[in-house]
Structure formats: structure tokens, C-alpha cells
Image (tube, grey):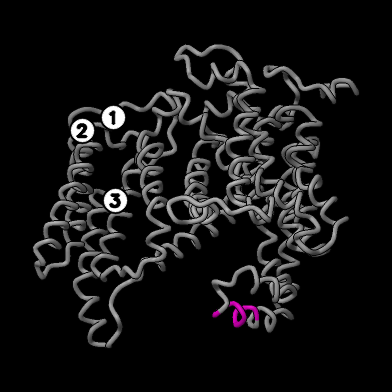
Amino acid sequence: MQQLGLRGVFRVPEPDAKVEGWHVSPLIDLAAYSLSWVWVLVPLLLLGPARADYLFWYLLTIGLTDLHRHFGLPYVYLDSQVRARYPARFWLFPAVLLLAWAASPYLAHSELVLSPVGACALAGLVVLLVQILRRDGGEAGVPVGELTTVLGGALSAALLLDVCTRSLRIDFDGAWWWFGAALFASTWFDSQRIRRSAQAPATPPTEQAIASLGGPRFAASMLILALMGLALVIRPWLERHQVQPGVPIDQLIAIVGVLAALWNFWHVYMQKYGIMRLYNAKARGLAQDQQEVPGWIDRALVLCWLPLYFAYLGPLYREIAVDYFDDAAAVLPGFIDLLEQAMPVSLPVTIAFVVVIHVLWLRAEFRVNRLRSAPRLLMAGGTTGLALCFFVFDPVKVYLAFAFSHALEYCVFVWAYQRKRYQSALAHGPVLGHMLRRPLWFYLGMILAFGVALLLLKYWGRWIMPDADRPELFGYRTAYWLGFWGVYQSLVHFYFDGFLWKMRLPSVRANI
């Protein structure tokens, strides 16, 4: 194994330097990955229990969290080669969420109710969106020109017909026009995919794509038709049972918030898993016959604590759970009661599960790497140490340390990746490459724009300069706007990260 020496440990290696097994260097990897939570948790534990006691560290964590959710956007939008790989994912999906964000503050205070047909039509449009996004970038992806023409035309026609129907006060639910647009576009995209594949074999993209090959023919269209059938039968059923038909818009927005929270939960753990797989790729030189530790055991290692959290921490911190998840206050106490009643059985089972997974992981690590991959061992130890902290210390403070750890990991990974990719001029001349010739100014600008500025807009007049007036925008406080922005932008962040940094992509492996 390469001997770095004391001076080498504290020096940041050149982007092309070979540091066996590590991502950047032992010191940076320890500080930013395996022990990234220590830097916040230790000072938090030395301070009082009230938020005012640790306000600086709270705001630092919130600021870093906002920063990391925007940290990968320059890589997508300032590099034409990256941007061209997934045109629909990088433009259509953010555009939909941007429109939702702009409307949400007003819709949340409205009394609008979607009819049963409208709710089903919205579900049909979501099916269409998923169909487009899953195939984007692969052999079955919809060409940009066709996507713009067909989707734009169908939705414009639906909007025009819906407006006319409402203006003329015709007794007809305008949501059916949106159903028709979704069905037409979905069927058109599938029919054209079949026609293209019959005319000529598909040309695989130059970069391996994380994309579906198309799936069963007209599956999305059939699902939209099923939603149409549901819309036809659900309203008479609701009227028969004297149930008020329709879905309030504010409830739909709340559902999006719950989806974002659940996705965030999964996303945080999958990032830990991703770092384990990064080290797995770097450790191949240690393995016999170029074997790999199976991905499932790394995933199990980071996720095995979740059942124990529910079994033990839920009943233990009942008041904190109800306080922090007040939207679920109607059902949460009953759920926690069930967890408490099940503890005599669930607690030993979940503890045994954690122990078994750790034994299996060590066994797999020994068989492949003979326990010689220090980065993997330290990352596993750091992840386990952080998980154990929830059982020893204030869970709110440990959660803040977890959030800080996650954000720091991501920022350092993106920094290291971009540092290597753009160390020399690329043939296509990306804008990001030019900007990173002065990395200090670039990253300082990112910190000011997406860390400091968002923090000030959120907490000015509350936690920062509490005597000052709170800023407003279009009749609502900027903190309110940024609350919705946090939900929708986090969905973009979670989605992009689900395919941008896959270790099986050649472009990713080349720059780690």
C-alpha cells in the first residue's frame, strides 16, 4: 500500500494523483465522509438543549443543507455534454416543479377542489411524465423535437379547450381534455418508438444511460385508460355514499411534502451506500480475482438500523416525534402505542437483525478484501458510530449532525469530481470548465448565493436580526416561499442524484 508520510497526509493531492483506495486523500476522506458528523455533534453536545443554545450550529447546518442541494446544478447546466444526455430530465422535470413552486403559496391558501375526474386526470399526467422521464437518455427516449411538438401541442390544446368549456359554462368537466392530452401523447410516443425500432436498429448512446428500454408496449396508455375508467365510476359511487366529491388542492400540496420527506429519508441513506460503493470500486486492486463486495450487503449495512429506530426510539421519544411531525398528530400516537406494545418482541428481533447484518458485512469484506480496505472499514465504522449516537444522545442534535454529514459528503464529492473532470480543457469547451479555472471564486459564489443568501432570506427578522422586519415577496414572506422551494428543489436534487453519480457509469468511474 502507498505510504504517504505525515506531510503527504495533510497535503491535498493533485487531481490525477493515485491515492490507493481513497477518494481524495486519507485526511479529506476521514473529515468529509466517515467522520463528517463529528464536527457538528461534538460542539452540539457541549451546548444546552434549547435551539437558542446552539443556534450557530443549527443555522450552519441549514445553510450547508441548502448549499448542497444546489451544488450539483452547475455540473448539469454549465456543461453541454452532460446536459445533452438527459434533455427531458434536465429541463422538463425541473420546469414542472418550478411551475408548481410558483403556484403553491397561492394554491395553499385557496379553497380550490379538484373534481374526482380532475384528480384522476392529474394522475394520468403524472403517468405520462414518468413514461417520458424513465426512457430519457436511452434508446427508447423521445427525441427533443418530437417531445416539444407533441407534448406542447397536446397540453396547449387541452388548456384552450378547458378554458372554453369553463367560459361557455358547458356542463362538462374540463379535466377530460387533460385526460385526452395525456392519452394522446403517451400513445403517440409509444407508436413512434415502435415505428423507429422497426425501421432501423436503435443506436446506443455514447454514454451508458440510466434509462428504461421502453417496457411493455402502450403500458402507460393502458394505465391512463384505467384511470379514465376509475374517474367514470368514482363520482357516482361518492354521490351514492354521500361523500363530498373532490380533493382539496392544499391536501395535494401536503402529499407532495410528505413524498419529499420520505424521499429525503431514502436519499440520505443511499448516499452513504454510494460512498461505500465508491470505495468498493477503488478497492478492486486489493481483491482476489477482481471480486467485489456485493451491493446488497453494503445497502443492508446502512439500512439495517431503521427497524431498530422504529422499535426503540419511537416509543422512547414519543413527545419529540409528535412535536416534530405535527401533521401526523392524528395517527402518530396510536402508531407509537402499537410500537410500544410490540417492544418485547420487536426489540430483540431488530437488535439481532443489526448484529447479523454487521457479521455478514464483515464476512463479505474479509472474503473479498481480507479487511485491508481501510477506507471501507472506516466508512462502515463511521456510519455505525453515527447510528449508535441516536441511542445515546439527544436525537434532535444527532439528526442535525446527520444532516450536516450528508451535506458535507455531497459537497466534497462534487468538488473532487469536478476538480478531476475539469483539470484540463475539454474538447467541447464547457462553461463550467472555464469557471473552475478560478475555483476559489466559483465556490465562494456558490456559498454566498445558495448558502448565505437563502439563509438570510429564511431567517432574517427571526433568528438573524430578530428585531428587523421579515422580508416579503408578492404578499408572502420569503421564508414561506423558500419553504415551498425547499420541497420542490429537493425533489429535483433527489431525482438528479439518483442517476447522475451511479458508479457503473464510465464517466463517473473515470473521475473518481
Dot 2 or dot 3, earlier in sequence: 3
Q: Magenta span: helix, strand or loop, mainly? A: helix
Outermost right residue: 6
- Badge 3: how crowded within 10 Å, few (<14), some, or many (20+)? many
Label drawn at residue 196: 2
Residue 365 placement, left or right of 217 = right
Q: Are marks 1 and 2 in contact (CB under 8 Å)?
A: yes
Q: Dot 2: what SS?
A: helix
> Which quadrant does the N terminus fall into?
top right
Q: Closer to us: mark 1 or mark 3?
A: 3
Label drawn at residue 202: 1
How many labels were placed on the picture?
Answer: 3
Q: Could you tell me which residue is drawn at 84 percent across and 61 percent down?
A: 48
Question: The disc labelled 1 sits on which kind of residue?
Answer: Ala
Dot 1 or dot 2, earlier in sequence: 2
Q: Dot 1: what SS?
A: loop
Residue 22 placement, left or right of 213 = right
Question: The disc labelled 3 sits on which kind of residue?
Answer: Leu
Question: The disc labelled 2 sits on which kind of residue?
Answer: Arg
- Region of the chain picked out in magenta, as a range: 330-336
Q: Could you tell me which residue is drawn at 61 percent across and 32 percent down?
A: 414
Residue at image mark 3: 128
The CA distance from mark 2 to mark 3 is 20 Å
Q: Is residue 407 visible?
A: yes
> Which quadrant does the C terminus fall into?
top right
Residue 48, compared with residue 147, is above or below; it is below
Residue 476, compared with residue 415, is above or below; it is below
Task: Give how far across and how far down residue 15 sits, in percent.
Answer: 68, 19
Q: Could you tell me which residue is drawn at 24 percent across and 36 percent down?
A: 148
Task: Give how far across and how far down residue 357 sits, in percent.
Answer: 71, 57
